[in-house]
Image (cartoon, rainbow, N blue to C red):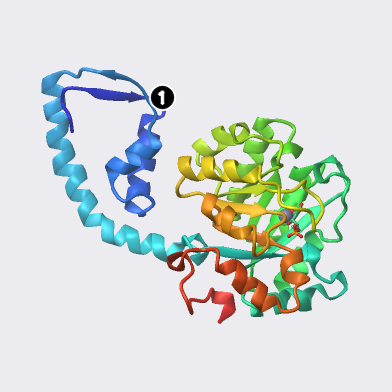
Amino acid sequence: MDATQVIIGESAEAPLLGCAVLASALAGVHPSISEAVEAMVRPARRIKPDADAANAFDALYDRVYRHGFSALKPLSHRTSTDARPETTERRGVVAASLLAADAGHLGDAADAVLHAGADWLHVDIFDGSKASNGALSSMGPQTVKALRKRLPDAYLDVHVGCRDPAAVVDALLADGCSSGLTFQFESCASLDAARALAVETRKGGCDVGVCLAPETPISAITSLLDAGLVDMVDVLAVAPGRGGQSFDPVALPKLRALREKYPGLRLQVDGGIDGATAPDAVDAGADVLVAGSYIFRAGDAAEAVAALREAFPPEASPQGKRWPWQR
Ligand code: DX5
Ligand code: ZN
């Protein structure tokens, strides 16, 4: 530690933040304590410390923290690896959007597309309100429940574009059948409401996703991201609500900016994704490709999924590595 200066962070919750920094390094989210500090602490000002106090602190730090850290690290790593779902791996993900599937045979379509190699099932819940540009999908919490019953291990990535997102999220959480819940940011009454929804979703055991319509800038959600409340951002490349629209390149600079600022964040791109647009989206930073029309309108879904997977660099898409539900 540099004894000539001390950084005072913006957060008044120093003990809490310190614990979070240590925990994130122990869990392997950041490779070292200093990199965790770099990523998580926003300096407000720097002060010169009292030299004696700094030396005493350094001695204590060395004796307690450094030794404790190396002794505990292997154990903590093992615990966190065991506890984490495999889906948090930095692997490229192809999510098949069931909005384009045959609604009369949804279970069969979902089953088939997982067999065709899709990683996740993307379930759009749209209620015909402004949040979905008037589009009404036939899928709702009952659909998610039925899919879970049919496919107990599938990753169900639920996208909620509804007038009252909290009510729909509550219902989904009560069922406990979703894997990740992504709500349309514009449908939240305020930033506080979005924050509360993110907290509730995480408490409910689901991955937290926030979806941005093309006209919403990423600055709208940076406070949620900086607070670590979000696992995934869904960058829409079309207006929310309908499948089969063309990819709007406005998504690309947003993906790029998010990837640059948040290297560990899951970045989903949704709408107009096909063999031609996927490489640009991945190049801009997306690691979850949502595709409906391209997969379900293709003659061969397995070929379409494979073509999307080609967009990922080989190390993000290891050959032969299967998700638990693809065994
Ligand atoms: C659009 C939905 C998408 C939609 C994508 O608002 O969020 O998930 O299903 O459909 P395609 O891939 O056809 O653009
Ligand atoms: Zn969607």
Q: Is residue 118 visible?
A: no
Which residue is labeled 1 in the image?
10
Q: Which residue is pictured at 59% across the width and 53% down the height?
A: 281
Q: Is residue 158 visible?
A: yes
Mark 1 burial class by Cα count in 10 Å: few <14, some 14-19, many 20+ = few
Q: Which residue is pictured at 77% across the width and 75% down the height?
A: 109
**SS of the residue at dot 1?**
loop
Q: Nearer the viewer, residue 260 or 325?
A: 260
Q: Is residue 133 left or right of residue 88?
A: right
Q: Residue furthest front?
A: 276
Q: Which residue is pictured at 15% across the width and 33% down the height?
A: 58
How many numbered badges does the structure rendering display? 1
Q: Quadrant of the N terminus?
A: top left
Q: Nearer the viewer, residue 70 or 38?
A: 38
Q: Which residue is pictured at 49% across the width and 66% down the height?
A: 86
Residue 183 placement (x, y as % from top left): 70, 46
In the image, residue 181 sits, relative to residue 102, either above or below, namely above
Q: Nearer the viewer, residue 94 or 188?
A: 94
Whether the residue carrying mark 1 lies under 8 Å from ligand 2 is answered with no
Q: Quadrant of the C terminus?
A: bottom right
Residue 278 placement (x, y as % from top left): 61, 59
What amino acid is labelled 1 in the image? Glu
Residue 191 placement (x, y as % from top left): 66, 31
Q: Quadrant of residue 36?
A: top left
Ligand 1 location (quadrant): bottom right
Q: Is residue 230 left or right of residue 66?
A: right
